[in-house]
Image: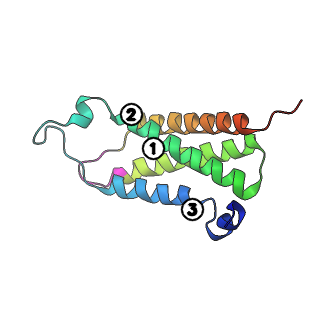
């Protein structure tokens, strides 16, 4: 089975939607209130913002891939839509966490989401421009 036939069976946006489901499920897990039992290595090593960069950078990259493969849009439009969707989803996820016990809604986390989305799109741009065959 070739790649085009596989895309017909599995649309290119499925990985992005699946990743959004993973994000939603993970952010639905109740957190620990500040000062809870035992050391919190996640906060101790300041992994929070790096995790936001990675999660939303990957989401942006997956949406850019989906738009590029599924629509044939030009790269600038593809990247813009991917950044907007990832950043908007980050905002809705921060709002969702407001209602989860032990979690909180944070502007700094959303900012990290948005920066991650920009970096993911930049990575896709780099990937897309490096893959093109060189013409003389």
**Residue 7: % across, % down:** 66, 64
Going 77% across and 53% down the picture, which residue do you hit? 72
Q: Is residue 21 left or right of residue 16?
A: left
Few, some or many residues within 10 Å of mark 2 (<14, 14–19, 20+) = some
**Residue 123: % across, % down:** 60, 35
Question: Upstream in the sequence, badge 1 or badge 2?
Answer: 2
Going 65% across and 37% down the picture, which residue do you hit? 127
Q: Give the secondary structure at mark 1.
A: helix
Name the residue beneath numbered marker 3: 14
Q: Give the secondary structure at mark 3.
A: helix
**Residue 12: % across, % down:** 63, 59
Question: Upstream in the sequence, badge 3 or badge 1?
Answer: 3
Few, some or many residues within 10 Å of mark 1 (<14, 14–19, 20+) = many
Question: Upstream in the sequence, badge 2 or badge 3?
Answer: 3
Q: Is residue 51 left or right of residue 83?
A: left
The boundaries of the magenta stretch are 97-104
In front here: 110 or 5?
A: 5
Residue 49 numbered tag? 2
Residue 55 numbered tag? 1
Q: Give the secondary structure at mark 2.
A: helix
Q: Is residue 39 left or right of residue 77?
A: left
| Distance Cα–Cα, label 1 vs label 2 | 10 Å
In front here: 117 or 95?
A: 117
Residue 2 numbered tag? none
Going 74% across and 40% down the picture, which residue do you hit? 76
| Distance Cα–Cα, label 2 vs label 3 | 26 Å
Q: Residue furthest right?
A: 136
| Distance Cα–Cα, label 3 vs label 1 | 16 Å
**Residue 118: % across, % down:** 58, 35
Please tell me whether the stretch drawn in magenta is mainly helix, strand or loop.
Answer: loop
């Amino acid at each position: 089975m070739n790649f085009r036939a596989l895309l017909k069976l599995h649309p290119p946006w499925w990985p992005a939607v699946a990743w959004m489901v993973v994000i939603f499920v993970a952010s639905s897990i109740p957190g620990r209130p500040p000062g809870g039992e035992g050391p919190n290595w996640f906060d101790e090593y300041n992994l929070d913002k790096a995790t936001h960069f990675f999660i939303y950078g990957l989401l942006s990259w997956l949406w850019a891939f989906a738009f590029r493969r599924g629509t044939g849009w030009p790269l600038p439009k593809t990247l813009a839509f991917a950044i907007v969707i990832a950043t908007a989803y980050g905002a809705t996820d921060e709002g969702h966490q407001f209602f989860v016990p032990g979690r909180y809604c944070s502007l700094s986390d959303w900012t990290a989401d948005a920066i991650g989305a920009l970096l993911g799109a930049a990575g896709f741009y780099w990937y897309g421009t490096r893959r093109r065959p060189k013409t003389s």
